Amino acid sequence: MKKYLVLFFASITLLASCKIEDLLNPAVIVTQPAMDITGTTAVLHGDLVSLSTTGTGTANAERGFIYTNLSMTPTLQDNKIAVGSGLGKYSYLLQNLKPNTTYYFMAYSLNSSNSPSFGMVQSFKTTDLKVPTATKVDVSKLGLTSATFTSSISDDGGAAITERGFVYATTANPTTAKTKVTSGSGKGDFTATVTNLVKATTYYIRSYAINSKGISYGIESSFTTPNNYALTTTFTDVASKPSPLLVGAKLTGAGTSPVKEYGVLYGLSQNLTAANSTNVNTNAPGTGFHASNEGGFLTPSLNNAKITSPVKTDGSFEVIIRNLLGAKVYYARAYVILESNEVIYGNIVTIPARTYVRDPAAFDVANVYYKSAYTLFDMLTDEVITPNISGTFDIWYSSNEDPKPYSRTFTKAQMTSFLFYKFKNKENCQRWCDLKTGVIKP
């Protein structure tokens, strides 16, 4: 009771310093309770309900708050925060306050002659600071030498978190004196990826956070990097076919890092890496020609190449290699790229040199888009067809061995040496053309 009497008389004292004409009908302003109080911050709220109708000067030129922790009677000579002007509710975030300290504040309004009106005095007490609260670390995307860490800061302890991150070591209870990786500041979720781990090694890990009170650590957990991923490469030499060749692979082993790419590398050199090889899936004709695991240079090339592939449920995958050079020894090896960007390679297999005989019925392609009045195919589905109408046909055509586009007139008999495809729409046909050397314009 004594406290509120003091606050009341403090308000009367402030009003006594105003001009008499302003006391006749001053502005009505309300000091509302402070909210969101921490060890160093608080949000003040005020409401300018009505403006002064007497006195000199314009009705309202400024509004805001005055506050202090040195007395129960804040004045305009203490800390003053201006927050715009005009009627209505307003608020302000006070920062850099002292922890565990009582503050007194009032809303105020000034007219253009600096005649003030005040709300009642309110008070709040900042909380005492404590160290932040960090949660246990979740380890994911675990590769041979990499892992992704995720944690969260649920409570900043009443002060801003200036640093947060993870500490890990091969011994228990790691601290920032050990290996650490920072991950921003503030509350909430945070994550980091490390790439300097040693395979087949157990690590202990904790999250940490730092505020002005000090440092805190989350609950310790541990993880073990896998010893290895096993990736085997096999090769099937299909003697009955001049091309393609089939290379298969299977991935096994520990680890939780998702694989984002499966594939096979091949070339005339045993120096086969994902970085020095050209993707030749995209060099294949459109959706009506090659499956997603087939490919090859349209023009036979000495460059290293790679063909990506979907994976089966048992971890195996295979690719079909097309358009190899005759009388050349090739090498192939499977690879996978983890989501952590680590690359795992399989063993290298040798593809013996042999002669690849041209097989137009199986590997030449024509009718990229027809130009005649005769309908060679109906463009509704992607499937192989043969011309079944007599007469002559003006077509664009090309082959795997010769990707240059040609325009010629053929009879039905002349076209029987080509394999025809029909496409779902003209755009699919055109995309097939555009992948050839040059762009065909029907």
Image (cartoon, grey):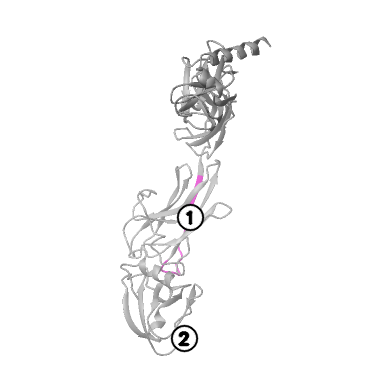
In which quadrant of the rendered view does residue 10 lie? Answer: top right
In which quadrant of the rendered view does residue 354 lie? Answer: bottom left
Q: How many labels does the image show?
A: 2
Q: Where is residue 145 in the image (x, y as percent from the top left)?
A: 47, 36
Distance (Cα) linking label 1 and label 2: 42 Å
Relative height, residue 316 to residue 256 (above, below):
below
Residue at mark 1: 234
Q: Can residue 139 be seen in this view?
A: yes
Q: Is residue 114 left or right of residue 28?
A: left
Q: Which one is closest to the eye, mark 1 or mark 2?
A: 2
Disc 1 residue crowd, few under 14, some 14–19, many 20+, Cα 10 Å: some
Residue at mark 2: 388
Instruction: Look at label 2 and name its amino acid.
Output: Asn
Which residue in the rendered view is the most extreme toward the right? 1
Identify the secondary structure beneath mark 1. Answer: strand
Q: Position of residue 111 (x, y in %)?
A: 47, 25
Q: In this view, does 13 lie to the left or right of 414?
A: right
Judging depth in this view, the residue of 62 and 400 nearest the camera is 62
Quarter occupied by the N terminus: top right
CB within 8 Å, label 1 to label 2: no
Instruction: Look at label 1 and name its amino acid.
Output: Thr
- Is 138 a magenta residue? no
Mark before the other along the chain sequence, 1 or 2: 1
Which region shows up in magenta?
230-243
Relative height, residue 46 to residue 415 (above, below):
above
